[in-house]
Image (cartoon, rainbow, N blue to C red):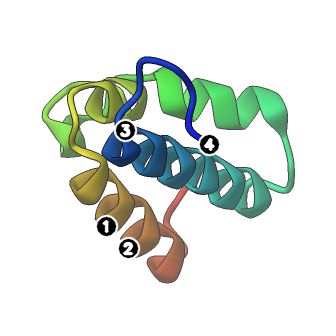
Amino acid sequence: MKPKGMTEEEVVDAIRYHQLFINVSLHMQWDANKTTTWFKTENPLLGNITPQQMYLRGRIDKLEQFVNGLIEEGSME
């Protein structure tokens, strides 16, 4: 069952975004302030937009790739 007004693709993207948030939180040792700040801060590596804006613009694939790459490199913070 999907939320009203959302397509299946939007539901899947929302789940992926939440999973990214959890992964970033885990990487930042569950520091909610750090994690929230990271998602709401403009990032020059993302074209001077926030990770949250990227998701809202439908760029979840690129955001997921970016976050996973940072975590793998150990350069998230």
Q: Residues within 10 Å of mark 4 (few under 14, many from 20)?
A: few
Provide the residue designation for mark 3: 10
Q: Residues within 10 Å of mark 3 (few under 14, many from 20)?
A: some
Left or right, 52 with respect to 29, comes to left
Q: Nearer the viewer, mark 2 or mark 4?
A: 4
Spatial CA span between label 4 and label 3 = 13 Å
Q: Secondary structure at mark 1?
A: helix
Provide the residue designation for mark 4: 1
Mark closest to the chain's N terminus, 2 or 4:
4
Provide the residue designation for mark 1: 65
Numbered circle sitting on residue 46: none
Spatial CA span between label 1 and label 3 = 18 Å
Q: Residues within 10 Å of mark 2 (few under 14, many from 20)?
A: few
The percent coordinates of residue 1 (x first, y second) are 62, 42
Q: Hey, what amino acid is under mark 4?
A: Met
Left or right, 31 with respect to 72, comes to right
Q: Secondary structure at mark 2?
A: helix
The percent coordinates of residue 73 (x first, y second) are 45, 79
Provide the residue designation for mark 2: 69
Q: Hey, what amino acid is under mark 2?
A: Gly
